[in-house]
Image: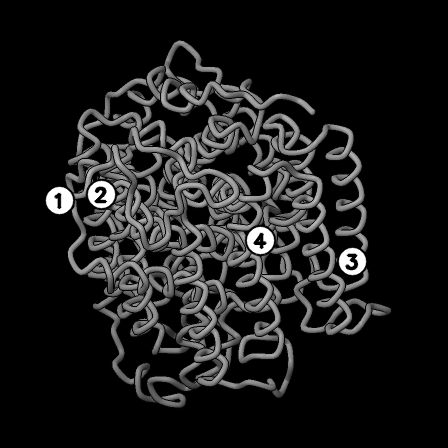
């Protein structure tokens, strides 16, 4: 069996090669630049199409939920500022297997955001320059055409690449001026839309919540609301490149969510009040038809033009220019985020060390190239903003469960580590942040989750081919065979299921029933975990055992998503609010199970100078605080 790499010090040493140049304002503007991207251009219509006027409530709830998630991360980021932070925290507190699953999910989501921002630019411009043939309507949804639309999007990705490759100092300074623009234009937009405000839009056509209460929650994940808020993480991701990260990262993280919440809520109110069903080409009160309407390619631009007010029509031209600037600004930020995600995976040895190669500008350039290539691949199966947004939201928020989990584990494991920001009422906020993330994933709906799960779990073959043998968990030949068997089985099972890469409300013809598909999926995952445990060494077994809570939670959520309110069944077996309460129970159980599963990993031991937990029950962490060397006091 190969000997593991015991030079854990490389985990800390890798960040020292990065340039520590970012100020508080630059971190804040990176987060704001991530928040104000394509979400504000499209999500207002997507939210109305899902929840009607009650979408305003969805934006408020979305801001609160994301703030709960961000608060937990604010304390952890102040303690441990790292580039690629969200990738790296799960492995510190819950081990390599949990770290890989969530890190892989986050990497997929991060690199695909740049792609969706490019799609947003092409889609918005396609609504104005129809002769360019950038978009077409397929099954009621605007998609990019081949070759015009997709080639244009790829060229934008190359632009994002160029902005990133020249260094973080240039990126942050360039982004500062772009973000001022991105703050001013949305503010002017909702102020001007109020000139055409019609209060009857909130009371007529079925009332304030014409589609019922459950779509208010569904809109959080599927219409782009939570997606729009997800930019708060940029300050976390660039933490290893900040001048004063312990102070600035928590401030930038929380403040960006609050500012974004104010702008988005006012924008949704203004857009809903200015909505003209006739000019959008749908029947009055046909909220769900808006996503396939003539306004879908450029909701705010169309709303301003439809008013007939000269000033607003002139501003619509400026908004069209912003449709190229705002998503592009977010696109190049997220390509950098994807780069730091790949970099973080490499630091944890999930990917080869090659991805830590730094150019003379302090940028992980190999990771940047990889992010560019993988991001462009998303144009093939998901060439639509409205199709890709649910995948990104669910995959990203899935990883955010670790903020609420990691905080209590770190407080228990390393109570004496300096905490520039100590979260008040953490015993309440941490589980609420975890539950907020779990519920958002559930509200994504079955058709989104089936694609997310297929993409996330297929990465396990990489784990067993590369990481596990390199760390000495299993023999290399065993890992090779296990990875091949799992890959073949996973592809076959999802092919039989007939749900992956389809937006239909039914499975593909000839597919097996859902109960059979679920049993086959669960059996494939559980057998893989059992084989990894059986053939593993004591360290590998310990890491696999500490991941059980995550696998159980994901499988339980997947099962409920089919039979619950947000699944494909016309009459769900568990309707709202029963289905939501069941998911809450799943979340509560898995939260406390997950906290109990946390332990002092080798990496955390190196950072904090405390003894690591050993396989076989050595130095148990649960309920015992920290062994000698960590101290007993709490700040």
Q: Residue at x 42, y 58 (%)?
A: 42
x, y percent for residue 91? 45, 40
Q: Point out the tag, 2 or 1, that comes first from the N-terminus.
A: 2
Viewer-side residue, 461 vs 192: 461
Mark 4 or 3, closer to the camera: 3
Q: CA distance from mark 4 to mark 3?
A: 26 Å
Using the image, tell me which numbered label, if any, was put on residue 635: 1
Viewer-side residue, 106 vs 137: 106
Extreme residue toward the right, this view: 510
Q: Which residue is mark 2?
A: 415
Q: Point out the tag, 4 or 3, that comes first from the N-terminus.
A: 4
Q: Kindly tell me whether residue 122 is visible in this rendering.
A: no
Q: CA distance from mark 1 to mark 3?
A: 50 Å
Viewer-side residue, 234 vs 154: 234
Using the image, tell me which numbered label, if any, was put on residue 384: 4
Mark 4 or 2, closer to the camera: 2
| Disc 4 + disc 2, Cβ < 8 Å | no
- Crowding around mark 1 (Cα neighbors within 10 Å: few <14, some 14 to 19, many 20+) is few
Q: Helix, strand, or loop for circle 4?
A: loop
């Amino acid at each position: 069996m190969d000997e593991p790499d015991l030079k854990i010090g490389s985990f800390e040493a890798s960040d020292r090669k990065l340039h520590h140049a970012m100020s508080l304002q630059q971190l804040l503007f990176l987060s704001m630049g991530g928040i104000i991207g394509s979400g504000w251009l499209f999500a207002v219509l997507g939210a109305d199409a899902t929840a009607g006027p009650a979408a305003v409530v969805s934006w408020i709830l979305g801001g609160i939920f994301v703030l709960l998630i961000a608060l937990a991360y604010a304390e952890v980021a102040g303690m441990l500022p790292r580039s690629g932070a969200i990738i790296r925290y799960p492995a510190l507190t819950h081990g390599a297997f949990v770290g890989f699953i969530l890190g892989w999910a986050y990497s997929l989501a991060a690199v695909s955001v740049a792609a969706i921002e490019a799609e947003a630019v092409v889609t918005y411009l396609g609504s104005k320059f129809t002769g360019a043939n950038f978009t077409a309507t397929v099954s009621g949804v605007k998609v990019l055409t081949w070759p015009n639309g997709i080639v244009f999007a790829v060229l934008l990705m190359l632009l994002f690449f160029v902005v990133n490759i020249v260094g973080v100092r240039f990126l942050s300074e360039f982004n500062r001026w772009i973000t001022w623009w991105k703050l001013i234009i949305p503010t002017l937009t909702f102020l001007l839309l109020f000139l055409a405000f019609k209060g009857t839009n909130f009371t007529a056509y079925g009332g304030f919540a014409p589609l019922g209460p459950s779509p208010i929650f569904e809109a959080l994940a599927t219409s782009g609301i939570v997606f729009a808020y997800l930019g708060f993480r940029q300050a976390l991701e660039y933490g290893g490149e900040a001048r004063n990260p312990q102070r600035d990262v928590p401030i930038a993280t929380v403040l960006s969510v609050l500012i974004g919440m104010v702008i988005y809520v006012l924008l949704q109110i203004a857009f809903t009040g200015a909505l003209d069903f006739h000019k959008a080409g749908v029947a009055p009160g046909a909220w769900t038809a808006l996503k396939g309407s003539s306004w879908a390619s450029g909701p705010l631009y169309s709303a301003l033009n439809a008013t007939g007010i000269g000033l607003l029509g002139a501003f619509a031209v400026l908004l069209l220019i912003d449709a190229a600037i705002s998503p592009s600004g977010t696109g190049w930020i997220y390509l950098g985020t994807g780069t730091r995600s790949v970099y973080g995976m490499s630091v944890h040895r999930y990917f080869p060390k090659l991805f830590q190669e730094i150019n003379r500008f302090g940028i992980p350039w190999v990771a940047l190239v990889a992010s560019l290539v993988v991001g462009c691949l998303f144009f093939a199966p998901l060439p639509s903003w409205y199709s890709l947004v649910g995948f990104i939201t669910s995959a990203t928020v899935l990883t955010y469960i670790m903020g609420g989990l990691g905080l209590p584990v770190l407080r228990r494991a390393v109570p004496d580590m300096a905490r520039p920001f100590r979260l008040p009422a953490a015993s309440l906020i941490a589980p609420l942040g975890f539950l907020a993330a779990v519920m958002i994933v559930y509200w994504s709906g079955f058709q989104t989750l089936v694609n997310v799960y297929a993409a996330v779990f297929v990465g396990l073959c990489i784990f067993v081919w590369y990481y596990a043998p390199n760390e000495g968990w299993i023999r290399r030949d065993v890992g090779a065979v296990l990875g091949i068997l799992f890959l073949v089985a996973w592809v076959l099972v999802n092919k039989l299921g007939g749900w992956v890469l389809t937006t239909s409300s039914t499975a593909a013809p000839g597919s097996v029933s859902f109960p059979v598909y679920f049993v086959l999926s669960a059996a494939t995952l559980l057998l893989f975990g059992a084989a990894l445990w059986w053939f593993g060494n004591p360290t590998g077994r310990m890491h696999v055992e500490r991941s059980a809570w995550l696998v159980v939670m994901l499988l339980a959520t997947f099962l409920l998503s089919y039979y619950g309110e947000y699944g494909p069944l016309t009459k769900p077996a568990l309707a709202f609010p029963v289905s939501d309460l069941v998911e809450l129970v799943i979340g509560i159980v898995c939260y406390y199970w997950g906290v109990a599963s946390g332990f002092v990993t080798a990496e955390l031991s190196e950072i904090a100078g405390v003894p690591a937990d050993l396989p076989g029950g050595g130095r148990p962490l649960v309920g015992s605080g920290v062994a000698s060397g960590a101290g007993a006091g709490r700040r």
